[in-house]
């Protein structure tokens, strides 16, 4: 995207950095819970180290007390992880939209440059058109950088944190329940709406920032498609790893999988794209295809774009592992 005078996308007045609001209360709560969990874990380890120095009755009473508190803190922490995953899913959706819009603006600039080389535009007209396109590109790149910064911050909250306590508590620890993702604008708030006006997004912005709120996410588009694996026969997918382990979904002529509420199989997880993959019936075979997802599609541990499925094949999408039954 260069002219004889330099790179169009870097010219023009400087653009202020953009910051999307973080859920600072959530960040503070997670940080505090992690500190509490670490302290309780240390004390439980000390109790084990001094077990022989106290009577069995005292040991069991004190150990039981700390295990109960550790279990409560860990459950609270896992519930907060569900909230963080919800924030991440929303940010990933926003990033996908920005990347699409950014690519459109870059193609528009390339077209302006090509048409100018063909003699369609006078130099002053070209400079004006190219300058406007370059400014939009730089502004969207700022938006993208702000979203990526928030994603890194949220991901860092649970970096290296396991899903289960290192010390077995006396009270069972249950994973956080599934969280329904809110509409995009409810998390990004007025900041994103303000960007529409401030950044001169024009016609394409109406679809991007002002889209109607997404309908409340459901676990499947049709609740009748969600069944217990033991009760289902015929071609199907069964979740063998993930927070909905054991659920099964019949394979239709075309079965879509993704984070979007309109998917045949809705999997709510930050690493899964809105339209992640599709399974189509082709004769007697079922073929799965990656729909240009961000994190890829894996069959039996190997990343694939298109793959005919055989009975027993394991399909990994995000952190979910599903088994195909013919």
Image (cartoon, rainbow, N blue to C red):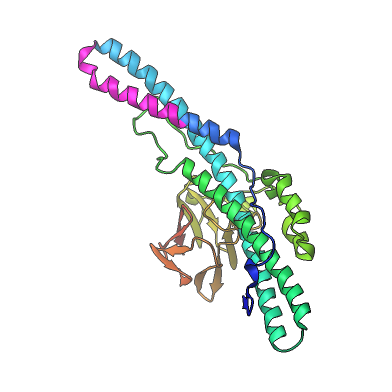
Task: Give the residue at x 57% y 35%.
Answer: 26
Q: Nearer the viewer, residue 156 or 244?
A: 156
> Is residue 45 toward the left or the right of residue 137 in the image?
left
Q: Splitting the image into 4 quarters, where does residue 291 fall? A: bottom right
Question: In the picture shown, does residue 302 fall above or below 168?
Answer: below
> What type of secondary structure mainly makes up the magenta span?
helix
Counting from the top left corner in percent of width and height, residue 127 is at 73, 75
In the displayed structure, 28 sits above or below 217; it is: above
Q: Where's residue 120, x and y in %? A: 76, 86
- Residue farthest to the left, as pictured: 52
Q: In the rendered view, does 224 fall on the left or right side of 57? A: right
Confirm whether the magenta stretch covers residue 52: yes
Side of 62 relative to 107 (left or right): left
* Residue positioned most to the front: 5
Residue 205: percent from left, percent from top: 75, 61
Residue at horizontal 46 percent and vertical 52 percent from the top: 319
In this rendering, position of residue 15 left or right of residue 148:
right
Q: Quadrant of the N terminus?
A: bottom right
The residue stretch that appears in magenta: 34-54
Residue 29 visible, this angle: yes
Q: Is residue 96 magenta?
A: no
Q: Above or below — where is 306 with respect to 35?
A: below
State the image coordinates of residue 322 (x, y, percent, origin top left): 46, 56
């Amino acid at each position: 995207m260069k002219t004889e005078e330099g790179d169009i996308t870097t010219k023009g007045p400087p653009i202020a950095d953009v910051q999307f609001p973080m859920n600072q209360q959530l960040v503070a709560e997670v940080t505090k819970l992690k500190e509490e969990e670490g302290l309780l874990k240390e004390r439980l380890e000390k109790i084990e180290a001094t077990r022989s120095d106290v009577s069995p009755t005292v040991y069991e009473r004190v150990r039981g007390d700390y295990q109960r508190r550790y279990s409560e803190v860990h459950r609270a922490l896992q519930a907060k992880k569900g909230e963080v995953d919800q924030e991440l899913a929303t940010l990933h959706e926003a990033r996908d939209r920005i990347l699409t819009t950014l690519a459109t603006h870059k193609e528009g600039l390339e077209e302006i440059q090509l048409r100018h080389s063909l003699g369609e535009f006078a130099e002053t007209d070209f400079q004006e058109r190219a300058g406007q396109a370059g400014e939009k590109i730089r502004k969207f790149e700022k938006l993208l950088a702000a979203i990526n910064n928030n994603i890194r911050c949220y991901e860092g909250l649970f970096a290296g944190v396991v899903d289960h306590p290192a010390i077995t508590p006396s009270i069972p620890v249950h994973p956080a329940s599934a969280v329904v993702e809110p509409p995009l604008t409810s998390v990004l708030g007025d900041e994103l709406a303000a960007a529409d006006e401030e950044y001169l997004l024009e016609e394409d912005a109406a679809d991007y920032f002002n889209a109607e709120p997404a309908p409340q996410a459901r676990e499947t588009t049709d609740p009748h498609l969600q069944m217990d694996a033991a009760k289902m026969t015929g071609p199907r997918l069964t979740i063998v790893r993930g927070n909905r382990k054991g659920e099964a979904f019949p394979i239709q002529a075309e079965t879509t999988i993704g984070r979007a509420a309109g998917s045949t199989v809705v999997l709510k997880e930050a690493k899964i794209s809105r339209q992640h993959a599709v399974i189509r019936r082709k004769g007697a075979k079922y073929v799965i295809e990656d729909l240009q997802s961000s994190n890829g599609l894996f069959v039996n541990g190997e990343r694939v774009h298109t793959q005919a499925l055989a009975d027993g094949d394991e399909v990994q999408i995000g952190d979910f592992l599903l088994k195909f039954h013919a």
